[in-house]
Amino acid sequence: MADIDASYVSARLVLEDGTVFRGRAFGQTESCRSFGEVVFNTAMCGYQEALTDPSYAGQILVMTTPMMGNYGVNAEDVESDRPQVAGFVVRELTRIRSNHRSTLDLSAWLGDAGVPAIEGLDTRALVRRLRVSGAMRGLVSVAEHASDAELVEAVRHSAAMAGRNLAEQVSPSGCGQWQGDLGEWRMPRSTLVGGEERPLKVLALDCGAKRNIYRHLADLGCAVEFAPHDLSATEIRDRKPDGLFVSNGPGDPAAVEATIATLREVAGEVPTFGICLGHQLLALARGARTYKLKFGHRGANQPVRNLLTGRIEITSQNHGFCVDESSLRETGGEPTHLHLNDGTLAGFRDPQRPLFCVQYHPEASPGPHDSAYLFDCFVAIMRTRRPVDATVMRTAQAARGARLGIETAPVGG
């Protein structure tokens, strides 16, 4: 933490268990109070992508890596048009940014967005508390004269994450055509996936989608139309998409009732792919159950086993809820991926219809690219309108490897 000077503004992070951490404010430094669920992310970089990820709406994000801000921020590495977090917590903010793409420092960028942040506290102690006790309600208090006891009481009267439909807060108000691709990060490709006459049309139920998901679909030649999360089944059918995509997003999946009702009618009627919250909503639409994890999976190095191909994938994840595997099996859903750290469900398919989904983020920017083949799987089932199986996944993995100039050997070969 930098030496105390005239610019020093005090801040507190207050947890519902009564713990109070003191530090220095950055970002929004005028007197304010911001509530949210306190969660942690173990990634070593990618703070700009995390801060703009709509899945973090309603949450105070703690980074376990001790120093943040090293490379500033830029206009390209964003997952939405603004920071989405309720607050940001780091051990140390560097005032020196060094990157040729940087256009603004992290503190100024957060300040322009009105996001309060705090540095100088013991994030190791904080993360250990969250790991043992679980994610909990909290608040970031900047330059307030309220007592610790008053702030603790305020936290305890704030809304819990369970039961909250936050997708409605970050979903677009209307439909629109996505413009853009992966730009300088794009993969080599040859032809449009829909053939010479037209690209495949993907309709995305946007519950808070990350832009890089749309960029990956567009980079494969798909024409992506985004829509509000509560678009009706009739409106979906009227658009006659080649594929239906259900996006990531924040909050409790069981509370997103309108989307669940829509998916109960149309999921699998056209080829369907879901990511993160979309995975949970597709499971709920089948009659499966979801539950809240103790502290969630948030980081860029989460190991997952693909049960159809036998491969291990290192994945990027950001979720606090999970699908109950036994209840999914009762609906006829077949698990396709398992999280190796705790054995939780990380993906499933419908064996009879062209529908599959994963709990993690195959677009992974920044992060590993092990799972990018899933976008190729989506393209494949839009073409064939048949279920995903081991052959589809192996073919997609090989095709993705070929585009990158990587030879993929059979598992065990």
Image (cartoon, helix red, strand yellow):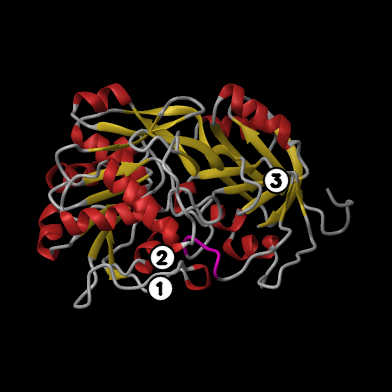
Q: Which residue is mark 3?
A: 90
The residue where tag 2 is placed is 215
Tell whether 8 sits left or right of 138. right
Horizontal arrangement in the rendering, residue 45 relative to residue 350 (left or right): right
Q: Secondary structure at mark 1?
A: loop
Question: Distance between the Cα atoms at labels 2 and 1?
Answer: 6 Å
The amino acid beneath tag 3 is Val
Q: Is residue 78 magenta?
A: yes
- Calculate the distance from the C-alpha at mark 3 to the C-alpha at mark 1: 32 Å
SS type, badge 2:
helix
Residue named by callout 1: 180
- Most foreground residue, 300 or 248: 300
- Which type of secondary structure does the marked residue at label 3 adopt? loop
Q: Find the magenta span and give its range.
A: 76-80
Rendering coords of residue 65 (x, y %): 70, 43
| Mark 3 and mark 2: Cα distance apart in space | 30 Å
From the viewer's perspective, is residue 346 above or below residue 278?
A: above
* Magenta stretch: dominant secondary structure: loop
Dots 3, 2 in contact, CB < 8 A: no
Label number found at residue 15:
none
Instruction: Identify the image quadrant of residue 378.
Output: bottom left
- Residue at the spot 45% in from the left edge and 38% down from the top edge: 413
The residue located at (22%, 32%) in the rendering is: 333
Q: Position of residue 29 (x, y in %)?
A: 70, 56
